[in-house]
Image: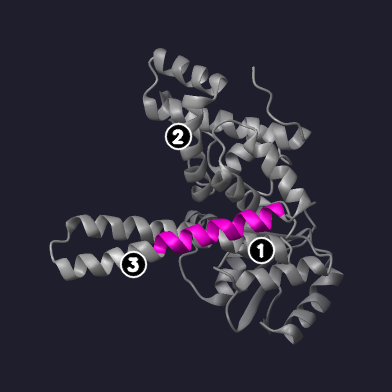
């Protein structure tokens, strides 16, 4: 294991900076088809255990898909993990070459697992879900602005934009439903997820698009991936409060809304939540625990491919 190679790749619009650990070999290729071919030809003989890229807002998608298509193990990681690792190890300078080195050091220390890269259809679903989040955020911001306005002309202008956003949201929801229902595997997964009281179409689409690991990991790993695993804050004799951190915030937001519904309409979740509150847990802590329990239930349902059975 100590002799296995890992590779960090810093992706930019025009080029890829590559760093190999533990050899320290570094090189750059262009971010185009010729550069991808050169990269594959150069790294394949190294038999790396993983190639790690940051999620950089889209540029990494083509790179990851190309490498995975060549049979190489690829992991796309949250950039915040890399930044936190860089700060923790004193790597404060920032250039493309240094970024590739830090990513490689992170890969060597953490050994993130390679994940299947979404195909074109899955990527399209992810873009639709991301666009829906953007529209919801814009609509919320415009509604807040509308409440503060007194000028009639500006009110009419915002009313028109709010109406447009609501119509765009309706059309996007239709596109999401059509895409999900047109794919047999996704249709089955959506039916399984929505069999659980509290899980609606938006939450189901979000989980399908942005949490493909659901049903493939154990309950602890899936909770950590989403950011619902409590971490200790202890030092010496001091025992701090356990808190959640990191993970996929947009998944937590979707689960938060689903859990609010579940604590009203899902009898086992409602009983679990009420039991924690009755035991003196703060409402926010009890709701977070209920979110984690709901995630565990969903994970088991997709793992076993068995729909929810009402008690």
Residue lying furthest right in this view?
45
Q: Residue 192: x, y in percent? A: 70, 37
Residue depicted at 78% across the width and 51% down the height? 184
Residue shown at the point (51%, 29%) measured from the top left: 262
Q: Which residue is mark 1?
A: 123
Picture disc at residue 184? none
Mark 2 neighbour class, 10 Å CA radius: few under 14, some 14 to 19, many 20 or more? some
Q: Which residues are magenta?
A: 165-181
User: Element under label 2?
Assistant: loop
- Look at the magenta stretch and give its main secondary structure: helix
Disc with the residue nearer the chain's start (1 vs 2): 1
Q: Secondary structure at mark 3?
A: helix
Q: Position of residue 42 (x, y in %)?
A: 80, 77
Magenta span has 172?
Answer: yes
Closer-to-camera residue (89/273): 273
Q: Is residue 249 above or below residue 257?
A: below
Closer mark to the observer between disc 2 and disc 3:
3
**Way the structure is coloured:** one colour
Which residue is label 2 attached to? Answer: 243
Q: Residue drawn 65% across and 64% down?
A: 124
Residue annotated with mark 3? 161
Q: Badge 3: few (under 14), some or many (20 or more) residues near its Cα, within 10 Å?
A: some
Q: Secondary structure at mark 1?
A: helix
The quadrant in which residue 46 appears is bottom right
The answer to whether residue 188 is visible is: yes
Q: CA distance from mark 3 to mark 1?
A: 28 Å
């Amino acid at each position: 294991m100590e002799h296995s190679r890992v590779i960090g790749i810093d992706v930019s619009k025009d080029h890829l900076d590559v760093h190999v650990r533990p050899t320290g070999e570094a090189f750059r290729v262009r971010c185009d088809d010729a550069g991808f071919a050169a990269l594959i030809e150069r790294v394949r003989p190294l038999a790396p255990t993983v190639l790690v890229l940051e999620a950089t807002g889209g540029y990494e998608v083509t790179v990851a898909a190309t490498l995975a298509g060549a049979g190489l193990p690829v992991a796309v990681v949250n950039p915040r993990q890399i930044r936190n690792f860089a700060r923790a190890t004193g790597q404060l300078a920032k250039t493309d070459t240094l970024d590739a080195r830090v990513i490689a050091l992170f890969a060597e220390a953490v050994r993130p697992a390679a994940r299947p890269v979404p195909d074109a259809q899955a990527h399209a679903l992810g873009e639709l879900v991301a666009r829906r989040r953007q529209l919801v955020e814009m609509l919320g911001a415009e509604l807040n602005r509308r409440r503060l306005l007194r000028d009639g002309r500006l009110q009419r202008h915002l009313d028109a934009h709010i109406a447009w956003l609501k119509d765009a949201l309706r059309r996007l929801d239709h596109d999401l439903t059509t895409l999900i229902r047109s794919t047999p595997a996704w249709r089955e997964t959506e039916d399984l997820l929505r069999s659980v009281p509290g899980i609606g179409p938006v939450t189901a689409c979000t989980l399908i698009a942005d949490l493909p690991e659901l049903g493939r990991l154990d309950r602890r790993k899936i909770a950590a991936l989403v950011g619902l695993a409590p971490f200790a804050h202890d030092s010496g004799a001091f025992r701090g409060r356990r808190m959640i951190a990191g993970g996929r915030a947009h998944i937590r937001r979707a689960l938060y809304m689903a859990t609010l519904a579940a604590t009203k309409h899902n009898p086992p979740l409602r009983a679990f939540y009420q039991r924690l509150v009755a035991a003196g847990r703060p409402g926010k802590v009890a709701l977070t625990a209920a979110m984690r329990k709901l995630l565990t239930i969903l994970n088991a349902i997709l793992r076993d491919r068995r729909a929810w059975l009402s008690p």
